[in-house]
Structure formats: C-alpha cells, structure tokens
Image: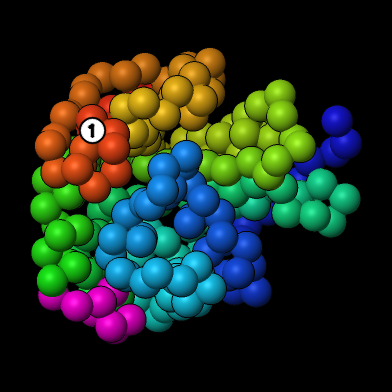
Amino acid sequence: MKKIEIRKAVKSDSKFLALSMLNSSRAGKKIGIFDLIFNVDNDAVLLEKLEALTTSDIKTYCHYSNFFIAVIDGQNVGTLCNYEPRIATAELLTKALEELGVSEEYEERASMISLCNFETDKRTWMLDFLTEQDGYGGLVIIKELIKKSLLTASLKGYRIVHTIVEIGSADIMLVYKKLGFKVIDEKKCEIFKENFGRSGVALLEFHL
C-alpha cells in the first residue's frame, strides 16, 4: 500500500464529499436518507443539493470542515465525518435544509425516521460517512481515517466516541468492530424498515 495522507477537507472538496455522503447514506440500499429528505429522482440534482449543504454558511454536521479525506498519490480515496453534537445540532440541520428548499412534508418524514435514531449525547464525539473508494481494500485507509479522528477527539478532551450503523450493514459493522467499537444499543422501527428495508439502527461506542 502506498503512503496514505489524511487531511482536513476544504471547500473545493464539496463534489467529492457530496458523492461520498450519498454513497454512504445508501450503503447498498436503493435509497438513503438524503433521497427521502430532498425528494429528487435525479442523482445530479441531489448531488448539487448535497454540495450546497457541505458549503452552507450554516455549519451542520455535513459541513466540509467536519471531514477528513484520505489521499493516495493525489487521489481522494476515502472520507470520514467527525463532529461535536453540542455544536452541530439538529436545529442547525433543519435550518440549513429549509434554506435549500426542503418542504415541510419531507422534513416531517425525516423527523419521523429520526425517531428511530438515538438521542445524541453532547459529551461524545460522533463519526459518520465513513467511506473507502473501490479498489482500496484491507481496511488500511479506514483505519488511518479513524485513527486521525480519535486523536483529534482526544486532543479536544473527548473520551467517548459514538457512531450509528444500520442493522444489516454487515460490512461497515464488521469494520467498526474490528477497530474496537462495541454495540451498546439497538433500535428497531417499522417506518425505517418501510423506507429503507432495514429493521433499524445500532449505536456503537469506543472509549479513548
């Protein structure tokens, strides 16, 4: 494996981040949460919306400043979002989505699905949108991204790291478990199954 550089994302990474977020949210499913929120049957338009979300003046957890990018030979090969729930709140996300023209109807559906989620602990460091480009197996890239994130969390004074994985996402679940994360809770929900074909979500935890 060639040398892996882990760097902070910048605004010009918005296209790459949008694609990574879309792929991560779908994770082997026909649709993901962003398909549901934006209600756009066109990936090009959906990606434009996600780009706008990553560069919005409202700094949601999807903002580019919360991402690390893995680079090999100048090529972006992986991403990881890390954020502080006490700063990147759900209220900020709602406000940003409203500015992007998301209708109340779809905000309501997204809110219903969020009931299948876990209450965010503001004392934790959160991980999301962990991706690795095809052709770069072996978990090396993912390990480097998470290692960088855990170091950052520790330097900021965090001792607990959380991530949420859909039940049935065997590959990503296995990755996190191999890296020392443990499932501490599960939540099953019929509306989640109706929309995504997955029974619910699992909360994973890592202690620094």
- Measured from the top left, where is residue 41 in percent x and y? 40, 69
User: Position of 165 compared to 17: left or right?
Assistant: left
Quadrant in which residue 132 is drawn: top right
Q: Which residues are magenta?
A: 97-104
Between residues 53 and 120, which one lies in front from this camera angle?
Answer: 53
- Measured from the top left, where is residue 8 in percent x and y? 62, 57
- Measured from the top left, where is residue 51 in percent x and y? 50, 73
Q: Residue at x 60, y 69 (%)?
A: 15
Quadrant in which residue 37 is drawn: bottom left
Decide: is 174 above or below 81: above
Provide the residue designation for mark 1.
200
Residue 116 visible somewhere in the drawing: yes
Between residues 179 and 110, which one lies in front from this camera angle?
Answer: 110
Question: What's the coloring here?
Answer: rainbow
Decide: is 58 above or below 185: below
Q: Residue at x 48, y 56 (%)?
A: 22
Q: Residue at x 62, y 34 (%)?
A: 142
Between residues 153 and 12, which one lies in front from this camera angle?
Answer: 12
The verdict on residue 77 being magenta is no
Between residues 26 and 17, which one lies in front from this camera angle?
Answer: 26
User: Position of 144 compared to 71: left or right?
Assistant: left
Amino acid type at image mark 1: Gly
